[in-house]
Amino acid sequence: MGSKTDGDDIPRYNGPDSSPMLNPTGGEARGVHIARDGDGVTGGEQGDDGDDDEDADVTGFSPPATSASTTIPPKRKRKKHKKKKTISAPKQSSPPRVPVSELFPQANYTTGELQEYDSVYTATARTTAEELRYNDRQVVQGSTFLSDYRQAAEVHRQVRYWVQQNVKPGQTLMDIAMGIDDGVRALLGNAGLEPGDSLKAGMGFPTGLSLNHGVAHYTPNPGQRDIVLQQSDVMKVDFGVHINGWIIDSAFTMAFDPMYDNLLAAAKDATNAGIQTAGIDVRICDVSAAIQEAMESYEVDIRGETFPVKAVRSLCAHDIKHYRIHGGKSIPFVKNADQTKMEEGEVFAIETFGTTGRGVLVDDEGIYGYGLSHDAPKQVTLPLVSANRLYKTIKKNFGTLVFCHRYLARLGLERYLAGLNCLERNGIVESYQPLADVKGSYSAQFEHTILLRESCKEVLSRGTDY
Ligand SMILES: [Co+2]
């Protein structure tokens, strides 16, 4: 792992349980276990609340009994400072419903993990003009950008800790997706039901729950046959949280059978390798190479057969722009010659996918979501009146954010399919399909959102889990 800062910079869980990893009903999801291993960030984070007094005893302030200074017994000091601060401290509920703004009343949201830039990659002269960098900084510092981002990351962490503790085989993907969406909106303190509210804060994109050979971009749609999570499933949980258009894009993988451990470890390791390599003036091809090398150093035994873990070729990590989940730069997980450089002030979603299949994905049946085309007009006048009306609704509620059937339905819209299809036929919205590898294969994903600050990387979405 990269050079980490001290414990104060490691995000803490403020939820009801001091140990977000432990599953109260016995055992823990395999992904949680894997996510924790090798990261070294979970130790010593537990039970921090209300035990200051005990700390006084163990930190070595008590002098030996023979010492002259025993005239001031530390015990007295302890009693004097005893306070019952745990009573008034706000806690996260389960399911998560307490807005993080109430847990951080001073709005001093937790800093992400800070990593130094790797000198191997940044030794080359910086090409970005001094003046340009200065301007970038002004943009970053002159707005609520960083605070919005850290708050969104806190929402992501608290919701996913709840998922890791509570999602079990036997639940339906619809219930799991709704649980995530409801949690995110509650913690943002914005139901997103009034016109325009979802643009202030809400889901960054449709919550993805892709199983096994389904690699990415599956979300449950209303009216479809619901899928029940199985003990043998490998589930990629990929959801986004945005505040004022600044999107946290972070994902992890859950499995309940230990035989997938190495598959999950490969994707987690590859993502961390990508994060470690990323930096100002680092070429995309160098990040890709680091990702592939880490990913393909793993193999996994599944039911007696050994599979090399392959990096998926059909998906990329990406930069994130204001209200745009894909900003235009793409980082493949396999070797390439792209000399494009990362730049100061940019936000990247560093994600990787590993698979036991071919690594080449095809569109699966069904639909994931929709987003406005890049050149979508201000307003449309199509022969289908419902399409024109729907277009206004989309612009007002989602803008350029990707949305799905579920998000339209909860606004009270009915029979929107004809309008949606019409908008798509006319090139005004684009649709996104689920992506799958060959049947019988398994895949895993981990993803973090990072910010390339002037002097360090901030892994905004880092948690005690991954
Ligand atoms: Co992403």
Image (cartoon, rainbow, N blue to C red):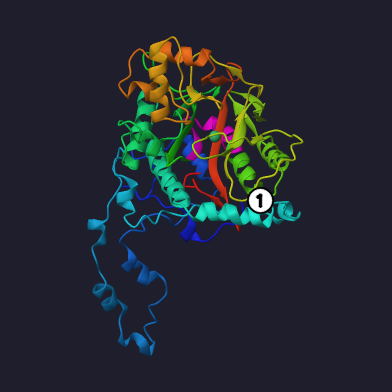
Determine the quadrant in which ligand 1 lies.
Answer: top right
Mark 1 lies on residue: 280
Place of residue 195 in the rendered image (x, y in percent of width and height, measured from the top left): 33, 31
Element under label 1?
loop
Let me know if residue 209 is in the magenta part.
Answer: no
Determine whether, in the image, residue 89 is placed left or right of residue 407.
left
Q: Quadrant of residue 456?
A: bottom right
Residue 227 can be seen, yes or no: no
Let me know if residue 254 is in the magenta part.
Answer: yes
Place of residue 261 in the rendered image (x, y in percent of width and height, measured from the top left): 55, 34
Residue 418 higher or lower than 221, as above or below: above
Kindly identify the residue that appears in the image at 64 percent across and 36 percent down: 329
Residue 344 higher or lower than 420, as above or below: below
Q: How many marks?
A: 1
Residue 460 higher or lower than 351, as above or below: below
Q: Outermost residue toward the bottom?
A: 68
- Magenta region: 247-266
Amino acid bearing label 1:
Ile
Ligand 1 lies under 8 Å from the Cβ of mark 1: no
Frontmost residue, 239 versus 268: 239
Frontmost residue, 116 versus 442: 116
Kindly identify the residue that appears in the image at 33 percent across and 19 percent down: 413
Q: Quadrant of residue 172?
A: top left
Frontmost residue, 3 versus 332: 332
Kindly identify the residue that appears in the image at 55 percent across and 46 percent down: 450
Place of residue 19 in the rendered image (x, y in percent of width and height, measured from the top left): 38, 48
Kindly identify the residue that appears in the image at 70 percent across and 33 percent down: 334
Frontmost residue, 69 versus 141: 141
Residue 118 can be seen, yes or no: yes
Other-residue count near label 1 (Cα within 10 Å), few / some / many at <14 / 14–19 / ≥20: many
Place of residue 194 in the rendered image (x, y in percent of width and height, measured from the top left): 30, 32
